[in-house]
Image: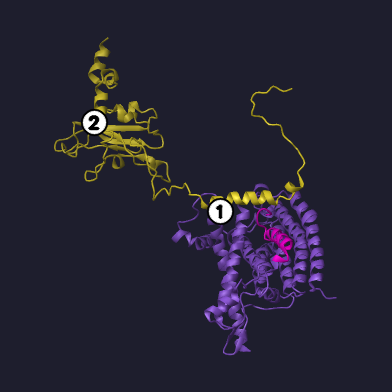
Chain colours: A purple, B yellow
Amino acid sequence: MISFIIYKFIVCVVVFGLSLGVAAYATLWERKFAAFLQDRVGPDKAGWHGILQPLADGGKMFFKEEIIPNVSNRFLFILGPSLFMMTALMTGSVIPWGADFTMDGKVYSAQITDINIGVLYLFGVVSVGVYGIMIGGWASNNKFALLGAIRASSQMISYEIAMGISVIALVITSGGTLSLREIVGQQDAGVANIVWQPLGFLIFFVCALAETNRAPFDLPECESELVGGYHTEYSSMKLGLFLFAEYINMFISSAIMSSFYFGGFNFPFAAELYSAMGLEAGSFWITLIGFGALFTKIFMFICVFMWVRWTLPRFRYDQLMNLGWKILIPLSLLNLAITVVVEFFRGNLHF
Amino acid sequence: MAIQLTNRSKVVSNKVQTPMEKLYLPAIVKGMLITFSHLFKKTPTVRYPDQLRSRAGIYRGQHVLKRDENGAERCTACGMCAVACPAEAITMENGERKKGEEHLYREEKYATKYEINMLRCIFCGLCEEACPKEAIFLTDRIVDAEYERDTFIYGKDKLVEKIDKRIDVSIRETKEVAEFKKIPGLKHNELFDSSKQLKKGKH
């Protein structure tokens, strides 16, 4: 029992560190990638090719003057970014990072917890995330921050519906399980879910862009209209937390998309590769290789996120609502209907 | 009908989007391919402090006050450069050379103070053209960035070349330049020749 707790503690710390580390280097990669897309060089002065830039940025954030407006609600003002950061980090707990491995006859799973309502948990935590923005924006007592917060919450609520419906279709395809581990496990031998759910994936991807407040849906922090949006009044590391949590969200949603639609830590011809390398089932190396495969997918998704950001201009607010309510929700319902019919004839649907 | 000034104006069309256009996806993919193609393009960046863009040989940058081959300052504080300067950036004070200073100053009169305000200077090179003693030259060095305005006023400490660190201005100190300065029609020095001015005063 003690060893179990120690092991889970280690996994927690690793996932926590991983989320922060990946988010930190995603900020650097974002700047680099933007530079490449725009024929620039990007940050390259801090260390080799700017490899220490995230540390410099973080250090700068910590040493900045911290301003809490007099008219703001002090408690809520501090709670906002904390909540946003906390929810961003919490989502990582149900993602299966690799296959189980056996050590000294004991089976360890490379996942913090495999709850059987993992998908539901994810949606619950993600929808709490909007409270961070809402509270932060409201507590600032600033009209721009409040407008940004209202935009963020209405946008997130609108897009969560389409996202949820597209995930229902996915759950039906995966045989009705809500556990992420089982969803990933089902893509083990067969094909990835993207083959059965291309439309569902597209809807999920667009909604993920909106949920993470990334361009072209970054209206909550739209600097041309709202100064800084919900974080207008924030400074120092509180602002850093808001900006940083966005990158953690991006990392986690990339991980979720990889797990849902692209087989997570599975990859084509994995079994053949393992037997060719002489690895037995339950070997730690299999977990590591699977983790590498998952990470490659996550990296690709993060690149696509950035690629989209540096290509598309921002939506207008009414266009955003039109897209969400009039296009994505009907489309996701259509996708759900088609999925049900297809799964019925595939024989996966039981009443 | 309004007067048409150019033929570049276009009639705005509010045509309804076709279903294909309404999908947006083809347009988005097209746009993303454009940005993707830029991933493989060479950056035109010049990494300035490490890498210098090539300049013309006669680039006019920071000034230098030359010394002669013995290491004595050439400048005699005649003030030609200050008069020629269209930006009025140059000021100087003169002094008389004392005995034993022959190795420091070439002629009996020299500049005790010589200042160029680099914020006023427009780097036109007229001072160099006006100088009868071949003392001031513009070089291809760039004036450093500073934080304070008064640090841009360069005195003799920054302008006069160091004895052991001579600055090469041979590209500007050519035979042609010397010949050019001798052309009577272009002898702008003459107007301020002290002896001639005295003559003018007799009229």
View extreme (top): residue: B203
Instruction: Find residue A292 and name its label.
Output: none
Q: Residue at x 67, y 78 (%)?
A: A113
Circle 2 chain: B
- Indicate the position of residue B203 as horizontal and vertical percent values: 27, 9
Q: Amino acid at mark 1?
A: Ala
- Indicate the position of residue A252 as horizontal and vertical percent values: 64, 67
Which image quadrant for residue B124?
Answer: top left
The answer to whether B20 appears left or right of A277 in the picture is right
Between the residue at mark 1 and the residue at mark 2, the CA separation in whole angstroms equals: 57 Å
Front residue (pair A251, A175): A175
Q: Dot 2 lies on which element? A: loop
Q: Residues within 10 Å of mark 2 (few under 14, many from 20)?
A: many
Q: Nearer the viewer, mark 1 or mark 2?
A: 1
Which image quadrant for residue A297?
Answer: bottom right
Contact, CB < 8 Å: mark 1 with mark 2?
Answer: no
Residue A216 in the magenta stretch? The answer is yes
Q: Please state, as top left, top right, bottom left or bottom right, where the N terminus of chain B lies in the image.
A: top right
Circle 1 chain: A
Q: Main secondary structure of the magenta part?
A: helix
Q: Residues within 10 Å of mark 1 (few under 14, many from 20)?
A: many
Residue A197 in the magenta stretch? The answer is yes
The answer to whether A155 appears left or right of B101 in the picture is right
- Indicate the position of residue A212 as horizontal and vertical percent values: 67, 60
The residue range painted magenta reads: A195-217
- Indicate the position of residue A325 as horizontal and vertical percent values: 79, 55
Labels 1 and 2 positioned on one and the same chain: no
Front residue (pair B79, A301): A301
The answer to whether B42 appears left or right of A301 in the picture is left
Q: Which residue is mark 1?
A: A34
Q: Which residue is mark 2?
A: B76
